[in-house]
């Protein structure tokens, strides 16, 4: 049985793409492919949301997972879910707040940065802090600048669909009152903060700068095997979302 079908409370604890095909497809790329890298490790889950990947990492045998999430109601959902599924509370910790306030000098073996690297303009600083944790394996699952030809209208109201962004650094404004978006921070004005969507090359450049080699999940092969999943995974399928694996000795 697919992972989240066994733990289907996760289909109800978030309004951020909790679709079975999507969560299970992402599980293949984030957890199943990397189970050897996660078992027995101390892991940081940045933007832990309703605990979906904290939980999946624990089920994959992680020794301990720390989640950072600014929305307390999502942390409350996570803890209720973990209690329902019998996860010992000593195996995880959630901190409520901004990753840049909570990630200071802690050490981790593995860092998960899932669905967050396009909700910040502080990409280099975040990777700097991740590298300073000592982590030798980092998973970044992020929207990226889409390929030419998939471009939509720059006039769209949905910041995630502004593909022909006239700002060359792919600078976007994002509402902070939406649970899937950035949280309010010092850059926030009029209910919006500034975020930046990186290109694939930018993620790899930053990874290399901080001493990591980078590989990608083969989403094309995945969709060749699971064409029916493309409906709820349009971003991965159309090439405007990527899963990167950063490694170093
Ligand atoms: C698109 S969701 C991703 C959820 C989950 N990690 C996933 O990949 O399925 C973005 C999450 O980032 C959180 N977030 C926003 N700003 C943040 C910040 N400054 N520090 C940590 N988390 C943040 C949001 O509250 C939300 O839960």
Image (spheres, rainbow, N blue to C red):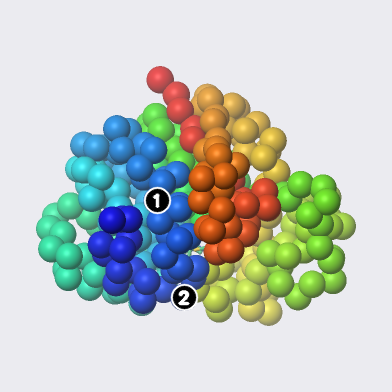
User: Residue furthest toward the top?
Assistant: 249
Work out whether mark 2 precedes mark 1 in sequence or the reverse, and give the earlier one: 2
Identify residue for label 1: 27
Measure how far apart labels 2 and 1 are at the Cα level: 18 Å
Say which residue appears at 51% left-offset and 51% top-offset: 226
**Which is more toward the observer, 102 or 235?**
235
Q: Are marks 2 and 1 in contact (CB under 8 Å)?
A: no
Q: Position of residue 108 (x, y in %)?
A: 32, 38
Identify residue for label 2: 15
Q: Position of residue 125 (x, y in %)?
A: 56, 43
Q: Position of residue 249 (x, y in %)?
A: 40, 20
- Dot 2, how many residues are within 10 Å of its Cα: few (below 14), some (14-19), or many (20+)? few
Say which residue appears at 65% left-offset and 69% top-offset: 174
Q: Position of residue 228 (x, y in %)?
A: 54, 58
Q: Which quadrant would residue 196 be assigned to in this image?
A: bottom right
Does residue 97 appear in this view?
no
- Dot 1, how many residues are within 10 Å of its Cα: few (below 14), some (14-19), or many (20+)? many
Question: Which of the image's four quarters has the N terminus?
Answer: bottom left
Disc 2 secondary structure class? loop
Does residue 149 appear in this view?
yes
Rendered image: mark on residue 178: none
Q: Nearer the viewer, mark 2 or mark 1?
A: 1
Disc 1 secondary structure class? helix
204 shown above or below 228: above
Say which residue appears at 55% left-offset and 78% top-offset: 177
Say which residue appears at 31% left-offset and 38% top-offset: 35
On the picture, is 54 further left or further right than 115?
Answer: left
């Amino acid at each position: 049985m697919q992972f989240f079908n066994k733990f289907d409370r996760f289909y109800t604890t978030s309004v951020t793409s909790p679709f079975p095909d999507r969560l299970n497809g992402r599980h293949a790329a984030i957890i199943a492919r990397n189970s050897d890298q996660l078992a027995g490790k101390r892991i940081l889950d940045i933007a832990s949301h309703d605990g979906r990947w904290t939980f999946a990492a624990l089920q994959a045998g992680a020794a301990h997972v720390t989640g950072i999430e600014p929305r307390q109601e999502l942390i409350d959902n996570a803890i209720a879910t973990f209690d329902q599924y019998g996860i010992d509370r000593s195996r995880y910790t959630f901190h409520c707040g901004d990753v840049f306030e909570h990630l200071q000098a802690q050490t981790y073996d593995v860092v998960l940065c899932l669905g967050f690297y396009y909700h910040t303009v502080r990409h280099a600083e975040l990777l700097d802090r991740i590298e300073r944790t000592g982590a030798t394996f980092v998973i970044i699952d992020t929207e990226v600048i889409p390929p030419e030809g998939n471009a939509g209208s720059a006039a769209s109201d949905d910041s995630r669909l502004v593909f022909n962004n006239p700002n060359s650094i792919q600078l976007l404004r994002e509402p902070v009152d939406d649970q899937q978006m950035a949280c309010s921070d010092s850059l926030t004005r009029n209910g919006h903060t500034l975020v930046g969507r990186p290109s694939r090359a930018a993620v790899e450049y930053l990874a290399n700068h901080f001493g990591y080699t980078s590989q990608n999940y083969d989403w094309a092969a995945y969709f060749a095997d699971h064409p029916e999943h493309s409906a709820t995974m349009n971003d991965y399928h159309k090439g405007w979302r990527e899963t990167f694996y950063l490694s170093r000795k």
